[in-house]
Image (spheres, coloured by chain):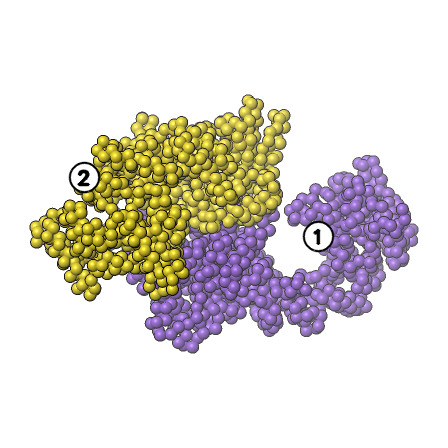
Chain colours: A purple, B yellow
Amino acid sequence: MSESQDPKWVYLFHEGSAGMKPLLGGKGAGLAEMSNADLPVPPGFTITTEACRAYYAGDKLFPEGMWTQSKNALLQIEQEAGKRFGDAEKPLLVSVRSGAPISMPGMMDTVLNLGLNNETTEALANWIGDERFAWDAYRRFLQMFGEIVLHVPSERFDYALDRMKELASAQHDYELTVEQLKRLTVRFKDIIFGEVRQEVPDDPENQLRLAIAAVFDSWMNKRSIDYRRLNNIPNDIGTAVSVQTMVFGNIGEDSGTGVAFTRNPGTGEPILYGEFLPRAQGEDVVAGKRTPMPILELQSSMPAVFEQLQTVAQRLEQHYHDMQDIEFTVEQGKLWMLQTRTGKRAGKAALRIAVDMMSEGVISREEAVLRVDPDHIEQLLHPIVDPDSTFEVLAEGLAASPGAASGRVVFNADDAEAWSLEGEPVILVRQETNPDDFNGMVAARAVVTARGGVTSHAAVVARGMGKCCVVGCSELQIDYQNQLFTTNGVKITQGDWITVDGNNGLVINGRVSTIEPELDDDYHKFMTWADEFRRLRVRANADTPNDARAARRLGAQGIGLCRTEHMFFQDDRITIMRDMIMAPNAVARAEALEKLEPMQTSDFEGIFEAMDGYPVTIRLLDPPLHEFLPAYDQTALEITELKLRLRLAPDLETINGLLKQITAKERILAQVERLHESNPMLGHRGCRLGIVYPEITEMQARAIFTAAIHCQERGISVSPEVMIPLVAIDKEFELQAEIVHRIADEVFRKYGTTLEYKVGTMIELPRAALTADEIAQTAEFFSFGTNDLTQTTLGLSRDDSGRFLPGYVGRGILPHDPFRTIDIGGVGQLVEIAVDRGKTARQDIKIGICGEHGGDPISVNFFHNTGLDYVSCSAFRVPIARLAAAHAALKSQAEQA
Amino acid sequence: MSESQDPKWVYLFHEGSAGMKPLLGGKGAGLAEMSNADLPVPPGFTITTEACRAYYAGDKLFPEGMWTQSKNALLQIEQEAGKRFGDAEKPLLVSVRSGAPISMPGMMDTVLNLGLNNETTEALANWIGDERFAWDAYRRFLQMFGEIVLHVPSERFDYALDRMKELASAQHDYELTVEQLKRLTVRFKDIIFGEVRQEVPDDPENQLRLAIAAVFDSWMNKRSIDYRRLNNIPNDIGTAVSVQTMVFGNIGEDSGTGVAFTRNPGTGEPILYGEFLPRAQGEDVVAGKRTPMPILELQSSMPAVFEQLQTVAQRLEQHYHDMQDIEFTVEQGKLWMLQTRTGKRAGKAALRIAVDMMSEGVISREEAVLRVDPDHIEQLLHPIVDPDSTFEVLAEGLAASPGAASGRVVFNADDAEAWSLEGEPVILVRQETNPDDFNGMVAARAVVTARGGVTSHAAVVARGMGKCCVVGCSELQIDYQNQLFTTNGVKITQGDWITVDGNNGLVINGRVSTIEPELDDDYHKFMTWADEFRRLRVRANADTPNDARAARRLGAQGIGLCRTEHMFFQDDRITIMRDMIMAPNAVARAEALEKLEPMQTSDFEGIFEAMDGYPVTIRLLDPPLHEFLPAYDQTALEITELKLRLRLAPDLETINGLLKQITAKERILAQVERLHESNPMLGHRGCRLGIVYPEITEMQARAIFTAAIHCQERGISVSPEVMIPLVAIDKEFELQAEIVHRIADEVFRKYGTTLEYKVGTMIELPRAALTADEIAQTAEFFSFGTNDLTQTTLGLSRDDSGRFLPGYVGRGILPHDPFRTIDIGGVGQLVEIAVDRGKTARQDIKIGICGEHGGDPISVNFFHNTGLDYVSCSAFRVPIARLAAAHAALKSQAEQA
């Protein structure tokens, strides 16, 4: 069979390109791309993944023609390199490396320094002028080949090496003499033959053939198979094999090796950043025995090389249109590129690089916007722990709300408030938080909980405040009674200093310096670009005028969720709220509601004012009423205490006073018991409250419209959107909407004026999504409450899932925490169904999302594709959502093009 | 315009038929049908609903031609009746009644005795020979016409009547003399003219015209509109008006009036059953001043009439193919039928009538099957409260599990067990039940709870046992401390007798006699017929060998749901189960599981044996582990008590003993606290347990396959189906199924044999339904857990919804309690989606349902139409489901035909 009839199994680097990743693997395609860009890459070739698949299909034999093609390619390399494989003067050495289309770091095998035998080792020694190096390279080659190609247990080599060091009284490998190294090569050969009755071939071609087969084989080793199963990588894509000329950075003073970024990855400053170690190979840098020099010093010590490097860096950036992270070797004054990849960078650098490269004309505005990750923006908005500091981590938890803060530990909300009033920076540490802790959270610089997930109460409220928070630190053993916590043997008592890193979910011992955020001109310029491209509008979830103002400063285009219940938790109000709940009849209830109304009205006015010109979506009362009552256990305890005091009461007056208190508390206790629910998440809440107590809906509607009219009279442009929560059935919505419209008419009549408003609903239950067409008959807008929709669709309580959900993500049962990134396969289907049916029933229905997912980039991308009108998220995630929305728009444009 | 060009607005009874209900209304169509069947119906005609609609469309004027057609119809009636409207000798009197296509009882108006004036009243008096009756009829006509047609307030007439009685020193209306009645007619006329400046026309035609218009008008009175809104009846269908000759049962000794069933509605015995009152009109029967005679006595007292009646009854049954409930009047020896409708009947009667009529050739076998309602079957299966007894209802609740039982009240499970062992019949009364109450429920004759809905723990468990149960008796104030409950002022203490009516949801004071069920030949014959028609197979939910045997006796074709956790609640087992939960490590856990395994194995053997030849679906452990631990409050209390005893401990030994107990209990308490969940329904349960603790899945699988092999070796035919609960994600299922298959292989290897089995999943979360295609890649069967699917789809906790769900159904927000009858519009969509996607992915997938809805007829009909293979329900609902499945099959056949 003539060669030309065989498939092309082998590509010289020059014949490939970055786009051929499926065929050449990631490494092969990258080397090809650099070669074609005329960058100095040690010559080589890549055997395709197709060849690997054919190898497995055909009883693990090289497919017809592959070996011949490989040898031909080798010939070309020899010519390019000016060295010959197995040559006794200037021997060519090569490496054989795996490279799958999808990166599987460390899973498969690599063999270096192929081409060495006794003869070529001598030649190498002569040529480099370093015998020790040459024999050590040979010794390493034998060991690597023995282990990987011939499957000799590595302990055998380690043992022999240790014995030799003992004999030589050497502590380190590099103390061995050339003679000892030579003896070791002999010993290694004996070991190999003894173990597997096979010899390492002296013939370089035979070495190469066996090494290629071994790399193919490593595709199916247990480690790789497990890794692929875990990461959902198909088994049948196969790996490519790259064969590349070895270069040496340790041949004389004009050689060396280095790593560098083409720009500063911390700040974005457009100058080379990295290190160089003269007369060294990559592994010497890793070993860390010599201190490398800053790369800029090359400018004086090796000006020619530095110039080469700068040119190459520029060419790389021009070619890849991005900042690069490179590895290179200088062999006798000549620069060789070993690897280039897009450089990881800090948020600040990402922003500056994007803006600079756009100014330099390297990238377009679209590319600049796509170049900055939403996570980068997040870094800019919050303090971070000084990366140069050292510290002791007390516990790891979930990074629930970003930022970093130091403070003194307190264990309850009252202490937090009291200490804070005295000017003490405090960190509130709780088992978990509930609405009673609200004031403590306001007072604290950061919040830590031992329980709960990223959408637990603590997490949601902290994110809403833009406050640093770490939750689910299950290692913390909190002892409220003694006001301390222990973790991994360390005991922290009230008043001790800790630092919380909400970016990485760390609780750190003591005070650690933090760096404050700073939004510069680059940021503002960049965000303007991003805003130009996005279609999704971005609103904020905000419950108070303060939050609303902060949200607007961060670019929010309205409020997507104003949770009215948070207004009830302030001290003077919770008492009235409790009166309302304890009311024995509708009259008493109406009385309490009447007291609450002006408070709500004034809050709404503040929010409307802050959002002048933008819509404000106000959700009617949502949580079950028992959330406003004190906890059962606590009240029972208080009653017991009062009863004990009764025993010691000195006079009748005290007794009467105590009895009165006891009676009052017992009434509350009875009500708490009556309102107790087994599953409050699925209980008497949302619009179910308004249906049983229409007077609550009436009061809230009256407050909204009164506030809106007041604002309108002051020249503020208001667009209230009244949102009915937890609707499952169209009639629930109709009944509540009827009340809202009636009250609106009443208020309009009273003031002799009118205004535009909408009444819509949360879509947060599967049934609402499935019957969205029915609900859209009367609902003028939808807002997806994806938190609750996730809980009900997956049957997964966000408060309780902490015990197993991390394991689910860890084991790949779910790709992400579904409370952080929307579960596209499940919850996403319901979103699509609801959008589709809602629009069918009402073409101009406005649809948004106000769950936690509104600030998550992957989710924002999904919402863009689903055709939503806006996303709404915590104020402090608004810039992230803005950028994510721009990315989504650009990506879908690109896909359509 | 010639008459023939007008639409036909008026139909003589002879011109209509039963099928013309939309046009003639229910009453008109019924009278037409009887007339056409040549039954003796007083002649009359019906004005169509179309005329009513035209009346409203045209400014409330009679449509062109309607009045002329009515007068022509009246002429025909006069001829038929041999009387004339307004005649001074034999005057024809008519009634004018409304009759909409959909029954709206009591909502619209009726005017009787039209045709009376001074002259015709005298004529009537002469003809009947009863002046008092004639003038009283006129007086009543004036009052009715005044109120309904002329809108005079009824109080005005009542006041005048009372004044007249005062003057006459009369206590009752009938004590008034003819002279006084005459004066009253004059007074009534004055009142009417004084109020509305209008007179009741003397001209009968004018009376008729005005009365017809008034009945049309009553279609739009507030009462009717409200009723239609509440019952979802459209406003635009309109009402028909029937004008019919009046007949009198009080003209002499050969007249009378009666009501009868064509067969005994209690027993089904095929003889007339009813009452007759000679010389009387319908209203006299209602007034109840004279005692009517049993209808069979007519045989001797009025043999000719009795014969007529029997003939008519037979003709009616032949015509309607069903037992009829009739009203009739005998006027001077002639029988007149006033109404016939299908007669309501008790379960026993329904069955006998169906079987008899089929034997008589009146109905086909299909009709016989359709004729018996599943509710009728339910009555046959459970004791009922003797309908002839009188009793005092203490409280009403939800009829959670049918039956009736008397017993002595106890307030906890231990008392229930102890008393029952001493031979006392007990009723367990609890706030709500939990798994700890299981033994008490076994011991009790009936269970009553103050809280919870029809799918609460008490309800589900009681239904499973076929035990009478009433839940959600919110009127009960239970005082555990003093062992009593109060309700509506009555106090019931421990040991008092009460009776529970689970058919009607009543708690009754004292002992009331009950009637035991009896399944006769008719029942068995009938059920065989039903089984012939159904396509759905019917399985039972059963957790023990006993339950399985009972289920099979009732016709179950396998077990659709065996809840393994119920096996763990028995006394010796719960201790081991707790050891398992408290295990500090996997080894200790494995040890506890090893102890449980033989117990599970032996239970499974018993169940397989009972179901020899049928499949048994076993669900792996489902509830969260904390359900197996004692309640927090109780344990905390016990610890406090132990600590108090510690203070008084006399010696060191006692102290040490107490300390040991305290330590043990505190460990439990800590675990209870650790396992506490905010929303256990959405918590760490179902397959999430098996994923975190695979050793539980392994133990259960081993028990299942060991039991199956043991049985197979004994010649029993076993088909185990292992069911993984609460799957939301395909990978959850895959991981669990992998374990089950592995263990099956192990067991098969151990015994050197094998057997057929399936591994499948519950579909009980919206996400599972939406991703059914993915899950069906590996799952071999689906079983809908519609209880949990309803909870998650509607976001509605069945345990907590009692406070507002009844109001939802009452106000028409939901058509049914969604935990009793499946919510077709919401949950039903998910069922359809899952069936569709499941079958697409795996054509031969077996699909059933094992939620509570499996025994609900409406739901069974839905499941039939959705293409499920089987339904599974409580054993005691199996016959109901069998019949419902037959109905569903017959109905869908009929629809397709």
Looking at the image, residue A896 sits to the left or right of residue A174; the answer is: left
Q: Quadrant of the C terminus of chain A?
A: bottom right
Number of dots carrying numbers: 2
* Residue on which the image places disc 1: A102
Residue B841: image location, x then y, percent: 61, 44
Q: Which mark is residue A133?
A: none
Residue A246: image location, x then y, percent: 82, 54
The amino acid pointed to by label 2 is Glu
Q: Residue at x 44, y 28 (%)?
A: B553
The residue lying toward the viewer, choosing from A13 and A691, is A691
The amino acid pointed to by label 1 is Ile
Q: Residues within 10 Å of mark 2 (few under 14, many from 20)?
A: some
Looking at the image, residue B580 sits to the left or right of residue A80; the answer is: left
* Residue on which the image places disc 2: B253
- Reply above or below: B210 against A229: below
- Reply above or below: A571 against B622: below
| Circles 2 and 1 on the same chain | no
The residue lying toward the viewer, choosing from A7 and B159, is B159
- Reply above or below: A834 against A521: above
Q: Residue at x 70, y 52 (%)?
A: A103
In space, the residues marked 2 and 1 are separated at their CA atoms by: 104 Å
- Residue B69 placement: quadrant: bottom left
